[in-house]
Image: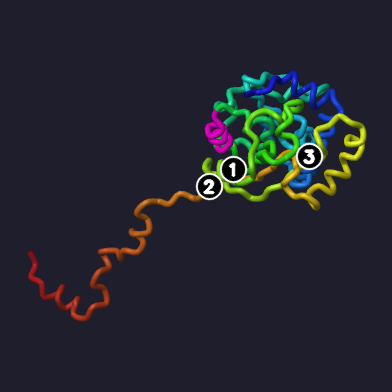
Amino acid sequence: MHLDVLDLRNFYYRTQLGRAAQKAVRDRLQQIWPSGPAEMTGQTVVGYGFAVPLLRPYLATARRVIGLMPAEQGVMPWPAGMPNVSVLCDEARWPLETGMADRLVLLHGLEVSDNPDLLLEECWRVLGPGGRAMLIVPNRSGLWAPRETTPFGFGRPYTLAQLDRQARRAGFVPERHAAALYIPPSHRRFWLRSATMWERLGGRLTGLIAAGVLMLEVSKQVHAPRRPGLGATVRRPLSVLEGVGQPGLSARVKESPPR
């Protein structure tokens, strides 16, 4: 079940809880993928689903930033006050060249997809060799997944093992995992004001158990193709050299009568 883009926009940009959730997940992503010039210069960063709230730090340093939004969800112009980089697309047919992306972020994409395997195949296609994707999904054992009052209460929540298996099935290599969104999904001021503290302490105290989202970084590893038969050709001696160095060869050649 896809969410409507207007509902996502209203949650992330017009509610205090949404802005707190946006900051918590974005800050965790920044810890893993810093947005500095040294890390992002020349990189193409792509977001799918409703990942644009996480992409803003990369606008200043990345070579290109693209926000893909599925047709079932709808699209909105982004970023505000700047040239639009958001694009409406089919979830399994993206308007990107093969191998174009260096970094890919999925948020509100995998858990609501009608065919997650096809979606991950498309992720694999657009990533270049060595490219990395960050899969962000609701945590099945977290506090946010059971609550349908936020976008994290829709679709299929995951455990880390389930997310790992699905990524491997698509050909990705899991690199590392993380978690975020430790504050309860509450609009009460106490929780909103202490959100930064809970994000700082959450990973140390409870690990993945109470986190609202799971984050799995995966990479695309492409092995160099092997040329069939090349090894056998190299290991086989050249026939024109057969017999060189054998005693009596020159004499046998001289004794052979002319034809």
Q: Secondary structure at mark 2?
A: loop
Q: Which residue is mark 3?
A: 181
Whether the magenta-drawn stretch holds residue 116 is answered as yes
Q: Please, is residue 230 above or below residue 48 in the view? A: below
Q: Which residue is mark 1?
A: 162
- Viewer-proximal residue among 75 and 228: 75
x and y percentages locating residue 158 in the rendered image: 64, 39
Highlighted magenta segment, given as a residue range: 115-124
Taking the image as shown, residue 95 lies to the left or right of residue 181, namely left
x and y percentages locating residue 209 in the rendered image: 72, 46
Cα distance between the residues tagged 1 and 3: 19 Å
The residue at the point 82 percent across, 39 percent down is 183
Q: Which residue is mark 2?
A: 222
Type of amino acid at the residue the image marks with label 1: Gln
Cα distance between the residues tagged 3 and 2: 33 Å
Type of amino acid at the residue the image marks with label 2: Val
CB within 8 Å, label 1 to label 2: no
